[in-house]
Image: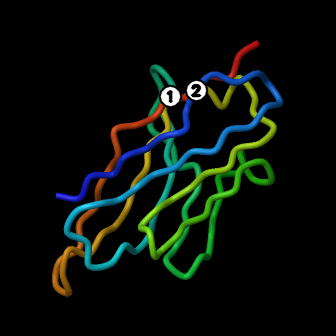
Amino acid sequence: QVPLVESGGGLVQPGGSLRLSCTASGDIFKVNDMAWYRQAPENERDLVATVARDGSTNYADSVEGRFTISRDNAKNMLYLQMNSLAPEDTATYYCNADVEVNRDNEYNYWGQGTQVTVSS
């Protein structure tokens, strides 16, 4: 098992910023693609942004230009800088990662989620 632990969520006013972090720990050989997803109540879990090991990124149209995904391969950490937050960004944010636990086996893991609430 490779626990993914998110942090950094909270309550912020519209127009504000938050930075989410996710730490992968345990028996890790290599962390490959990493991503942030979010899920609002009664909605499906949607992809927010992805970052490959080489640093290449992709974003959902709804967050392009406002959110920045990044990672630290040496620390097995993932980040999401969220600026210009709006009420529609309110959701539980989940970290996701493809982790090689050895040279032959790769598994996909989810974090437990961190709540982001944007409200005045």
Tell me where residue 111 appears, x and y as whole percent. Answer: 35, 45
Q: Nearer the viewer, residue 4 or 108?
A: 4
Tell me where residue 19 appears, x and y as whole percent. Answer: 63, 44
Tell me where residue 61 appears, x and y as whole percent. Answer: 71, 50
Q: In this figure, which residue is indicated by the disc labeled 1?
A: 115
Question: Residue at 65% of width from left, 31% of height from top?
Answer: 89
Left or right, 82 with reference to 5: right
> Measured along the vertical axis of the image, is residue 80 above or below residue 74?
above
* Quadrant of the image occupied by residue 23: bottom left
Q: In this figure, which residue is indicated by the disc labeled 2?
A: 10
**Distance between the alpha carbons at the discs numbered 2 and 1:** 6 Å
Q: Are marks 2 and 1 in contact (CB under 8 Å)?
A: yes
Which tag, 2 or 1, sits closer to the chain's start? 2
Task: Report the quarter where the C terminus lies.
Answer: top right
- Residue type at mark 1 is Gln
Left or right, 72 with reference to 33: right
Tell me where residue 58 appears, x and y as whole percent. Answer: 63, 64
